[in-house]
Amino acid sequence: MSNNYDFNVKRKRPEEIYSKVSDYFKGETLEQYASSKSIVKMQEKITIRALELLKLKKNDALILDAGSGPGFTAMYLNEIGYKAVAIDLISSFLNYYDIKELNPIISDMCFPPFKPNTFDAIISISALQWIYRDINNEQMKNMLINLSKSFFQILKPDSRIIIQFYPKSKKILENIGKIIAEYTAFKGHFIIDNPNSQKKRKIYLLLDKET
Ligand SMILES: C[S@@+](CC[C@H](N)C(=O)[O-])C[C@H]1O[C@@H](n2cnc3c(N)ncnc32)[C@H](O)[C@@H]1O
């Protein structure tokens, strides 16, 4: 990322208004999100881009969809031949899955209940901003440390993670990069698509666990 590039989103995002994600995604909001055709389309588009960046070597890779919500990414991965495991905090989202195919797991992705070296890849779409969004909040920092250490552990060597998310500012994004570099052995960088359009901008964090 160029040092000259900067952004600071003025509009308040839901994660600034609701401290807990389960206070936002409930009732009508949850139902609307889970059944919106336009959100399915958008999240699929992000997933396709995430796969492009991951450059998977195996056609039948086992992929964790972390913060899966109603499972748009996991379902898409499954449809195109990958083996997807989905986890999310909110149990009502997981009712949207075809349970026989995906066996979604209710779990905090900062404490993923898997053995070391389990996954060929991890994809997380539009979730990280709920975990880390305030550089002065020690609890959020600790959750991010836990998430990155756990992801490092459950990922197979020579594998990658892609995280798409909506940081509020360049400062938050940089802090995330610094924390992950300090506490794990991941090699990583950010990719910003459509950097000059607030509406179309998509931010990805690509993390490599080298052998
Ligand atoms: C905007 S939704 C995105 C859902 C899905 N990835 C998609 O692309 O449609 C954010 C999701 O992140 C989940 N989430 C946020 N923090 C989480 C955590 N600590 N552990 C697991 N899931 C979390 C929320 O429950 C919610 O389902």
Image (cartoon, grey):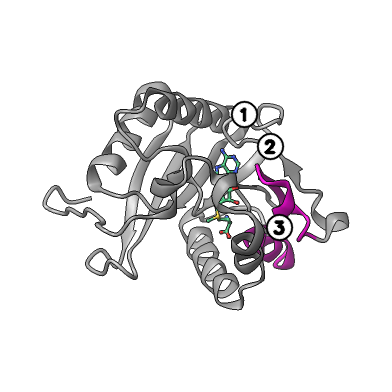
Check disc 1 and report its element: helix, strand or loop. Answer: loop
Mark in front: 2 vs 3: 2
Q: Which residue carries the number 2 mark?
A: 107
Give the mark toward the camera: 3 or 1: 1
Label 3 CA crowd tier, 10 Å (few <14, some 14–19, many 20+): some
Q: Residue under circle 1?
A: 111
Judged from this view, the residue extending furthest toward the right is 100
Q: Amino acid at mark 3?
A: Tyr
Taking depth in this image into account, of 135 and 12 the one nearest to the observer is 12
162 in relation to 184, above or below = below
Measuring 47% from the left and 40% from the top, which residue is drawn there? 19
Query: Element type at marker 2?
Result: loop
x%, y% of residue 57?
Answer: 59, 53
* Amino acid on which disc 1 is placed: Phe
Q: Which residue is rendered at x = 63% and y = 54% of the image?
A: 26
Q: Which residue is mark 3?
A: 82
Is 184 on the left or on the right of 51, as rendered?
Answer: left
Q: Which residues are magenta?
A: 71-97
* Residue 44, image x, y percentages: 57, 69
